[in-house]
Image (cartoon, rainbow, N blue to C red):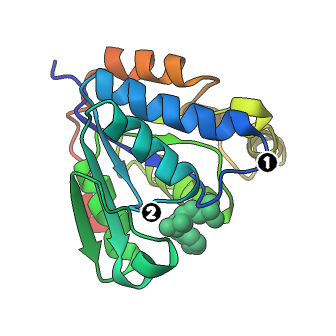
Amino acid sequence: MPAIKAVTVFGGASAGHDPICRETATALGRGMAEAGITVITGGGSIGMMGAVADGALGAGGQVIGIIPDFLARREVAHTKVSEMIVTDSMHSRKRRMFEMSDAFVTLPGGLGTMDETFEIITWRQLDLHAKPVIICDVGGWAQPFLALIDALIGQGFAPRHARRFFEVLTSAEAIVDRLSAMPVIEEATEVSRL
Ligand code: AMP
């Protein structure tokens, strides 16, 4: 089975108050580079996004940024990435990220990170893909998100198996180990329906 080659890392345009978040992003980028996995990010140089890119580039890894043209200035496009793909909209950015990635990792972030994470999980719920999704629960960041999912299951609005759409890991090392051990999901993805 082919090994995972490229992974989109979602994460905040800010780094949050707890320094463990930025440290984890840097360590994740470094670990992915050492494992030979290309990091795909939103292309910004700031916050968690910038930290994961810097971690990977510092270890000699490949980083691909995918940024909509209108965000390039606002999120200070990273100037040192291996490749920068500029899209004409948020939707085409998400689609390119999806097409190019074998798996997805969510690092701590805010509303944009939540939007991206929910979208990739709901596409799994709709059986549009079977690519792995890993949520990094560092510093307890994911606990309110997990409580929300559990509440939705308890209320009968989300399926009982909703927690199986993603995995939760608590450190950069654990995520890199998991990604390194994963085979690429060869199942057809229905990109035309996204
Ligand atoms: P945030 O987690 O709010 O700091 O956002 C992280 C990144 O998510 C932003 O920098 C955007 O590039 C991206 N993003 C994706 N979808 C959205 C959305 N609907 N609203 C805001 N940001 C988004």
Extreme left residue here?
A: 2
Answer left or right for 151 relative to 136: right
Residue type pointed to by label 1: His
Q: Is residue 121 visible?
A: no
What SS does tag 2 mark? loop
Quarter of the figure with the C terminus: bottom left
Residue 176 image-quadrant placement: top left
Disc 1 under 8 Å from ligand 1? The reply is no
In the image, what residue occupies the spot 32% across and 54% down?
A: 98
Residue 62 location (% of width, % of height)? 24, 41
Residue 15 location (% of width, % of height)? 66, 51
Residue type pointed to by label 2: Gly
Q: Is residue 49 visible?
A: yes
What residue did someone put label 2 on?
Answer: 44
Q: Which mark is residue 70?
A: none
Position of residue 17 relative to residue 1, above or below, is below
Residue 79 image-quadrant placement: bottom left
Residue sitting nearer the eye, 182 or 72: 72
Measured in 3D between alpha carbons, the distance from the residue under mark 1 to the one under mark 2, in whole angstroms, is 19 Å
Position of residue 120 relative to residue 95, above or below, is above
Quarter of the figure with the N terminus: top left
Residue 4 location (% of width, % of height)? 25, 28
What SS does tag 1 mark? loop
In the image, what residue occupies the spot 50% across and 28% down?
A: 27
Disc 2 under 8 Å from ligand 1? The reply is yes
Mark 1 or mark 2, earlier in chain:
1
What residue did someone put label 1 on?
Answer: 17
Look at the numbered discs 1 and 2 and tell me whether their residues touch, using CB distance below 8 Å.
no
Q: Quadrant of ligand 1?
A: bottom right
Position of residue 87 relative to residue 117, above or below, is below
Answer left or right for 164 relative to 43: right
